[in-house]
Image (cartoon, grey):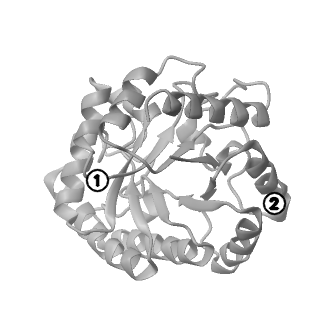
Amino acid sequence: MRYGMNLLLWTDTLSDAALPLLDDIKQIGFDAVELPLFEADVKTFAAWAKHLDNAGLARTAVTVRGAADNPMSHDPKIRRKGIDANKAALDCCQAVGAEAMVGPFHSALGFFSGAGATDEEWGWAVESMKEVAEHADKCGVTLALECVNRFECYLLNTAEQGVRFCREVNHPRCKMMYDTFHSHIEEKDTAAAIRALKDVLVHVHISENDRSTPGAGNIRWDETFDALHEVDYNNLMVIEAFGQALDRLLPATKIWRRMYENERQLAAEGLKFMKDEVARRW
């Protein structure tokens, strides 16, 4: 098993001010970092590749789409913007050496029609992702699509929907990730959700029910780790926790108060929690 830390605990932008975090994350004991990818600046990501290599850290990147570049929009011009934005993000992933691009970039985060996804919207999302998956293959990057809860999107909320979506995109680069926070809201059976993802699962977010220190809340952790062991998951487990410095994601994360002592302690305690749970089973 490998363990990663999402930089969104500290920042939503890659800047020189964030560089000292890399050595600290490595010192804590992580194998990888997850980078925020909200600005498609290939030069910046290429420069960070060198910093990450020097720190000895593997990497993934997380991105989202919004109403202006929604890949399943009724407007074909907006769908095109969504496809192109995902392709540009993949170019950054290639530049930084990210093995996967993760997140709910299948549709607009925080945008709603007032109803569930129509068959037409579903079809548009699938067609958009087919083109994105082709570009991902050229970049050597795997797509790890994320199901998120009903308060953040209305296309993919459950593992069952995610598996169906991957099946219809039908591309080896189009896979799924599992997020414990969203599953805690949407799934009736944690283990069944993970089993459903078995053949397409390439990434896991370890995220507490209040988005703070993993293991300190009420996620069904025993069922989660038991099921991950059952399906023989053996890739990255990445802590995703949020602070209050994320202006771009605040409308979705709704983090209004501090729920941990400090970021370093959250990272260290979260890593110990993951390793202890894995050691008990694997």
Q: Quadrant of the C terminus?
A: top left
Q: Residue at x 50, y 17 (%)?
A: 218
As drawn, 181 above or below 135: above
Task: Tell me which amino acid carries mark 1.
Answer: Val
Q: Which residue occupies the foreground of this view, 204 or 78? A: 204
Q: Which residue carries the number 2 mark?
A: 19
Secondary structure of residue under mark 2: loop
* Horizontal arrangement in the rendering, residue 47 relative to residue 73 (left or right): right
Q: Residue at x 72, y 50 (%)?
A: 11
Give the image quarter of residue 19: bottom right
Secondary structure of residue under mark 1: loop
* Crowding near the residue tagged with mark 2, few <14, some 14–19, many ≥20 C-alpha atoms within 10 Å: some
State how far apart marks 1 and 2 are (Cα): 33 Å
Q: Which mark is residue 200?
A: 1
Q: Residue furthest left?
A: 119
Q: Nearer the viewer, mark 1 or mark 2?
A: 1
Task: Tell me which amino acid carries mark 2.
Answer: Leu
* Horizontal arrangement in the rendering, residue 161 relative to residue 55 (left or right): left
* Horizontal arrangement in the rendering, residue 111 relative to residue 133 (left or right): right
